Amino acid sequence: MNSNTPTKHGKPRRMLFMWMIENLSHMPCIRGLMLSSPVFSVKDANDSFQFNFYPGGSINENYIGLFFEQLPPSSQVKIYNCSLWIGNSDTVLSTSRRFRNTRFSQRIGSHYFLKNVNTNFLTKTVTLQCILSEITAESLHGSLLDVEMLSEDLKCLYESKKYSDLTVVLHQHVFKVHQCVLFSRCPSLFSEYGYENCHEWPVSVEITDVSLETFSQLLYHLYTGELQNLEISLDLFQYANRVKAFSIINCLIASDYEYSAHTKILLGNQIITWNLDGIQYWYKGSLALIRIPKTDSDNIRHIVMQLTLPENSIGEKIFNISFKIIGFSQDRPISLTCDISLYYSSGTLASRKAQHVFLQDEVWLFPEFIKLNDIPLNIAVCGARLKAELHIYGCTGQRYRTVRRSDARISTDFNTVIPSLKMLQSAMKNLYEYPYKMGQLTLLTRDNYFRMSHAPILWIRWPGIRSTLETLGEISTISELGVPLNFETLMALLSYIYYGYFSDLNEEYARELLEINETLEMSSRVVEICKAILES
C-alpha cells in the first residue's frame, strides 16, 4: 500500500509504504540471503523504490533483515528521513529503525536482532511499514544551525562557570569546569592522574605536565566543538592524542586535502581482508604486516596490524584492532586514516567505522568496533569478512597547520555538520542517553515519571528554568524539580536541549509545549520549530 501526501505550496513530500505478510515461516526464500529474498517494489508519482526483507538462517533464528533502496538512484539530489518499522497485531514484536538525512546513494537498512522474542511470531501476520519524508535544503540547514547554537551555549556555560563542580589548577591558573561536559567529551582526560572513571573524579585536580596555552585550547574545543586559533600546534596534537581527545584531530579532516598537498607525503595505501570462517578458532589473534617503503621524510619501515577477540569488562567478545609502528620517528608523526568494514556472507555491510589519527605513540588502538555477540553465529562462520582500508602519510615536520575558519562551521553540500560539531553533538547525545553519569537533578513530570538530568546543561539551554534552579542554590546532592510536561514530551524537549535535535517531535508534543510556553519559557528556536510542526 502506498500513501503519498502531495506537496502544498512547495512543502516536502511524505510517503507511506505498508505490506502485510501472513505466516512468515513459510516465506519462499533462501533464508539469510538477501539476493534470494522476495522484492517489494513500490512507486509514487516521481520515484521508484525497492524493499528487501528476509528472515534468519533457520525457522528459530532471532534476526531478520530489512533493506530499502531507490531504483534507479535519482539524478536529483533528494534528501529523506526514512523510518522502517515491523510489528504484528499481538505486539509480540514492535521495533523500528530511523535513518536521517539520507540520499539513497546506496541501500539503507539494518539487521534486526530479535532477542527474547516468542517464536510464534513467525506464524503470525507481520506488518512492514516504511515512511519517507523528503527534506528541503531550508529545513536541513535549519536543523544544522541548532548544533551551532548548542556550541554557542556551551561556550557561554564555560565562560560563566555556573554550576561548575571541578577545579583544575595549572601553573597557578584556576579553571572552573563542569564534570558532565568533560566526561562526555573526553572521559580519559584525568586517567593519567589516577582517576579511571567519572565516579572517582575529585573536586580539584592539579596538572603540571602541559602548557597553559595547550590546556586552554583543549578546554575551548571540548566545550564548543571548534578550534580557538587558526594555527594549531603540534603540542596540542600530542596532548589530544595522549588524553584521547580525538575530536581535535578529526575536526581538521575537512581541510586535510589542502594540508596534505604541502606538508604530508603519501607512504602507502593498503587494503587488508580477513575471512571470518572458523572465527571460533582464532581468538588468540591474527596479524597483518603492512610494509611501507623508506623515504627521505620518514624512517618508518612497516606497521603491524593486529586483530584479536578479547573480552570486555562484562564478558562480551569484541573485535580488538591495534597498530604497532616499527622504525618510528616521534618528531615526525604518522597520519593514519583507517576505514574498517564488516560484511556478511551475502555481501551486506553489517558495520563500518572510520578513524583518522596522528600517531604519536608506537601503539594505537582502534576504537571499539563491534561485539561478536552482535553477529549471528551462522553468519559469522559462513563467509563473513572484515575489510580494513588504510591510508598512511608521513609528515614533513612542519610544526603548524592552517585551518580555514569556515571549516569549523556548516558544510554546504548537505553532508551534515563537519566532524568537530558532529562529534560535539554525538557526545552530548550520549550524555542525554545516560543521564545517571554525572546527573545531579531529578525532573518529575506531571504523569508521575522522573528523569535524571544535569543542572549546568539545563541552566544554559533552558531559559525558563534558570530562576527555579537559582532557588535550589548550589546543587551538591540530588535535587528534585517538577516540570508541567508529560514524560514523552519532556524527553523530546531534552533531546533538543542536550544535542540540538528533536529526536521525536510530533503535533501532540509540539502543541503541549506551545500551550504552556509562558511557564516553560523555552528558547525562541524551540518555539519556531513547534509552530512549523503544527503548520505543516
Image: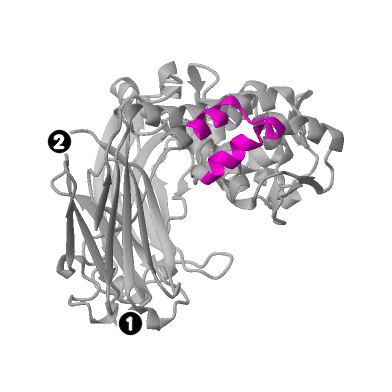
Which one is earlier in the sequence, the residue at label 1 or at label 2?
A: 2
Disc 2 crowd rating (10 Å Cα; few below 14, some 14-19, many 20+) is few
Q: What element carries label 1?
A: helix
Q: Which mark is residue 75?
A: 2
- Check if residue 472 falls in the magenta segment: no
Q: Mark 1 points at which residue?
A: 123
Q: What element carries label 2?
A: loop
Disc 1 crowd rating (10 Å Cα; few below 14, some 14-19, many 20+) is few
The boundaries of the magenta stretch are 508-531
Q: Which mark is residue 375?
A: none
Image location of residue 193, percent across then percent down: 71, 44
Image location of residue 331, percent across then percent down: 46, 30
Residue 76 visible (yes or no): yes
- Asked whether 269 or 294 is in front, the reply is 269
Q: In which quarter of the image is residue 253?
A: top left
- Asked whether 210 or 189 is in front, the reply is 189
Q: Where's the C terminus, which quadrant?
A: top left
Asked whether, in this view, residue 440 is left or right of residue 131, the answer is: right
Instruction: Judge whether 341 appears above or below 81 on screen.
Output: below
Instruction: Judge whether 208 appears above or below 198 on screen.
Output: above
x 28%, y 81%: residue: 25
Image location of residue 236, percent across then percent down: 54, 28
Image location of residue 310, percent across then percent down: 48, 66
